[in-house]
Amino acid sequence: MAKAGPASVEFRNVSMRYGAVTAVDNINFTIEAGKLVTLLGPSGCGKTTTLRMIAGLEIASDGQILIGGKDVTKLSAADRDVSMVFQSYALFPHMSVLDNAAYGPTVKGLGKEQSKQMALEKLALVGLKGFENRYPSELSGGQQQRVAVARALVLEPQVLLFDEPLSNLDAKLRRRVREEIRELQQDLNLTVAYVTHDQEEALAVSDRIIVMSNARIAQEGAPRDLYEQPSNAFVADFIGDANLIDVTVKAVTDDRADVAIGSATVTLPARGIGPGSAKVAIRPEALLLGEPGLGGSLPGTIRKCAYLGNHLDIMVETEVGELFVVQYGGREMLAPGTAVSVSFAKSGVTLIPPA
């Protein structure tokens, strides 16, 4: 039978309540067909509940969920063309890799031979050709993860869901497996909803990111937009590191704002903010340290300096508070107590609308 191909996912005013607790509060978003969209946020923000509602493992209290333009709000998981890769992989320990991968078509009654063929095809796709007769306990974490992906792909679902898929892997493997997932998604043109609390992972794999906070959507957009133009302090702080500083907007002309950061003044895109008090988010790499007494900069004193291989993490005491600075490349360590000047790079300093 011909498969339908990837489908879009749409949430219209969707809420999920458990008694008096609202886990997801009136959210709207669309995942376009063939795109990877990440739901990102801290524990308890509603991202996994949202994923489970796409899967049909939770039925929304309010609103509408559409997959490929079809209303699936009240359909059970079995009646949706969706597969999920769980955090624990949920492989059957007593079954071989092949039987694990063929589980879906077997349960759907497609016959042993056909199920096997479908499973072999997907195992080859995720680089597990030759592992068919092993058992999960004989595989590494990364290989188990791939079996889980092959099993989810075998029925060629319209939407593939990942729930924190890399949290059981070590850091190096995590990077490799996330690249594999992204390549597979692009090569096969899959619609993927991906849940993580790891911002670096989200930045690396996503076409778009939906940042959730307290059961709502804080901001959504392309990874670069969220990093460079956060719409609020929560997003600025959650995606990457940011120094959040109280500032004064002195004047605005043609959407350029003159902003006083302590005794220094910088000109920034106004982002619709008028004169008065505001906040800026400053990325650690956008703070430049120089000899003391540089014009247009803030005076500072080094408080701490840590060596992290390819960069230094530095804390600098200034009149606007303690600033976190990152310097890349082979830089000299700076002794605590050293006087410096702190100036601002052209990008990485953003006005944040008041809450």
Image (cartoon, grey):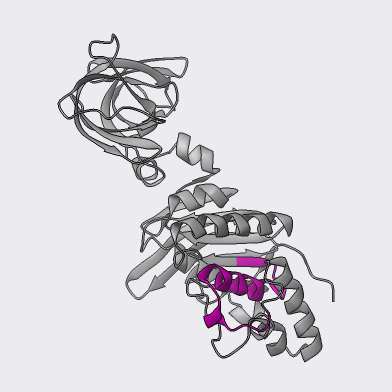
Q: Residue at x 65, y 54 (%)?
A: 35
Q: Is residue 111 visible?
A: no
Q: Is residue 340 above or below residue 189?
A: above
Residue 209 pos. (x, y %)? 52, 50
Is residue 233 rendered to the left or right of residue 67? left
Q: Is residue 191 magenta?
A: no
Q: Is residue 145 magenta?
A: yes
Residue 70 pos. (x, y %)? 69, 67
Q: Quadrant of residue 177?
A: bottom right
Q: Is residue 229 above or below residue 145?
A: above
Residue furthest top in the image: 295
Q: Is residue 108 above or below residue 1?
A: below
Q: Residue at x 62, y 70 (%)?
A: 149
From the image, which quarter does the N terminus lie in?
bottom right
Q: Nearer the viewer, residue 220 or 202?
A: 202
Q: Quadrant of residue 113?
A: bottom right
Q: Is residue 93 above or below residue 311?
A: below
Is residue 5 rendered to the left or right of residue 337? right
Q: Nearer the viewer, residue 176 or 351?
A: 176
Is residue 354 rendered to the left or right of residue 231? left
Q: Which residues are magenta?
A: 132-160
Is residue 288 rendered to the left or right of residue 168? left
Q: Is residue 295 visible?
A: yes
Residue 142 pos. (x, y %)? 54, 67
Q: Residue at x 31, y 27 (%)?
A: 332
Residue 355 pos. (x, y %)? 32, 40
Residue furthest left in the image: 337
Residue furthest right in the image: 1
Count of labels in the image: 0
